[in-house]
Structure formats: structure tokens, C-alpha cells
Amino acid sequence: MQSFINYKNIQVAYSSQGKGSAIVLLHGFLENSSMWKYLIEDLSKKNKVISIDLLGHGNTECLGYIHTMEEMADVVKAVLKSLKIRKSTFIGHSMGGYVALAFAEKYTKNIKGLCLMNSTAQADSKERKETRTRAIKMAQTNYKSLIQISVANLFAEESRELFANEIETCKQEALKTPIQGYIACSEGMKLRPNRESVLSSATFKKMIITGKNDPIISLESAQREAKRTQTPLKVLSHGHMSYIENKEELIKTLTNFIKN
């Protein structure tokens, strides 16, 4: 069951379940808090689990035409303030990781732990920015095709047949994202800076989870980043969508991260 807060005259949707230490779950681009369903069932047995629909996703409205990671971090802060939560462990999938890093940079004292799940502290490369710009153009003319291609490409090749039903569900959830939300978040991701210094200087616990065959973030890139920032790295066997492709192992990894 979702609740809402008012933030700059828009409605922001979130849910809060369980009691104990606060765990904040931040979904990725073209996802929403429904992606965390199985994880919430597990984690809320011993923790207070907060999942938030980020700007222009799920049941949260858009706020203008560029959703920066910093603005989304402020949205998260507003939700936590309304719940009177001071310190939390953050788990961010893909874009959710970028938002978690922006939050950690701005509100360091409110962070107990940070897990980048199929995510990176690096900024977009020149090529990645160009890809996003092309996708923004396509979104304005052929949104449905763009979404269907984009979602399928997040899975490791060997997963695509195995998880055909789940991929279909992801596509349907992604299509709920309005075009304005797609464009605003794409523009925001293009603008985000490199935040490896947030990981390097962290006094809180930290971890990177990556997929061996992640088509978005290469294993080599994740390994180099983990080494540069002295962040423990967990490698799972499949692609970018670890919460589907490596569900059991992911739940175990995150449970241990939260406990330690």
C-alpha cells in the first residue's frame, strides 16, 4: 500500500513496511517500486523498508523537464523526513544508485550504508551521452518500440529466453513511465558527475554488486571502480537485472550486507 507526500506541489509515492533499521530501496530507470516486491517481503521481517517511486516513475509525478540526481536525492530526503528517519542503509538499482550517491554526497550524516546494485559512481561517457540523446529523439516518435528494445537489452543474452515472462512484465511496467519522465531522467543522468570520491571517502559500509554479463556496465569497469574506491565487489552470474536474473543470491547478498 503506497502513501504520498507533497513535494514542490507534486505527489511523491512511497511505501514503508516492517520495523527496525531503515532500509531505503531506490529503483532504476523505467522501473518503479514494484520491482522490489520479493526483496521487501524478505527484508521487512527484521527491518523498516522504504521504497520510493522516483520522479516521473511509478505513481510519482514529473517535476519539470530535467530530473537531476540531486533533485531526486532531495525527494528521497523529503520522504525520510516525513517518516522521521535519520539514518538509513541505501540500496540503489542502476539509476537508483546514482540517486543514492547524490544523497550520500549531500546528506552524508544520514547514511548508514550504501549498496550500488548494477550501478556505478562514474559519469556517463561521451558515447553513453550520445546514446541517451538518440533515445530521447526516438522517444518522441516511437516510444513503445524504444521501451521494448531498451528493456530486453538490460538482460544478459543467456537470460532472455529463460526469463521471457519476467521481461514482458518489465516492459509493461516500463511503459507506465510517461515520455516526460523518460526524457527528464535521461537528461538528468547525462548531467551527473563522477562520484567515485563519495565511495572513496565513505565512512559508512559500502558495496558494489555487478553482473558478470551485464550489458550496461562491464565487469572490467566495475572491477576497476571497486579497486579505485576500495569498495567490496560482489559479482553475480548474469546481467543488469540481478533482482530477476540472480534473485536468490541477490537476496542473500543484501541480507548479509544489511546485517554486517
Image (tube, helix red, strand yellow):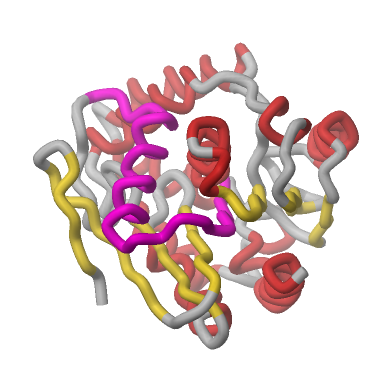
Q: Is residue 161 left or right of residue 59?
A: right
* Residue 81 position in % (x across, y down): 32, 53
Instruction: Give whichever of 85, 213 is nearer the camera.
Output: 85
Residue 171 in which image quadrant: bottom left
Q: Is residue 42 above or below residue 23?
A: below
The residue at the far left in this view is: 9
Residue 70 in which image quadrant: top left
Q: Is residue 151 left or right of residue 254?
A: left
Instruction: Give whichever of 174, 82 is nearer the camera.
Output: 82
- Decide whether residue 90 is among the magenta residues: yes
The residue at the far bottom in this view is: 45
Can residue 117 be seen from the camera position used here?
A: no
Q: Residue at x 65, y 61 (%)?
A: 242
Q: Is residue 114 left or right of residue 36?
A: right
Instruction: Give whichever of 19, 242 is nearer the camera.
Output: 19
* Residue 36 position in % (x across, y down): 48, 68
Residue 109 in which image quadrant: top right
**Quadrant of the image for the C terminus?**
bottom right
Q: Magenta segment, which residues?
A: 65-94
Q: Residue at x 30, y 24 (%)?
A: 66
**Quadrant of the image for the N terminus?**
bottom left
Can residue 159 be seen from the camera position used here?
A: yes
* Residue 4 position in % (x across, y down): 19, 60
Q: Residue at x 55, y 51 (%)?
A: 92
Q: Residue at x 23, y 33 (%)?
A: 180
- Decide whether residue 119 is among the magenta residues: no
Instruction: Give whichever of 167, 249 is nearer the camera.
Output: 249
Q: Is residue 192 above or below residue 180?
A: above
* Residue 9 position in % (x across, y down): 9, 40
Q: Is residue 149 left or right of residue 142?
A: right
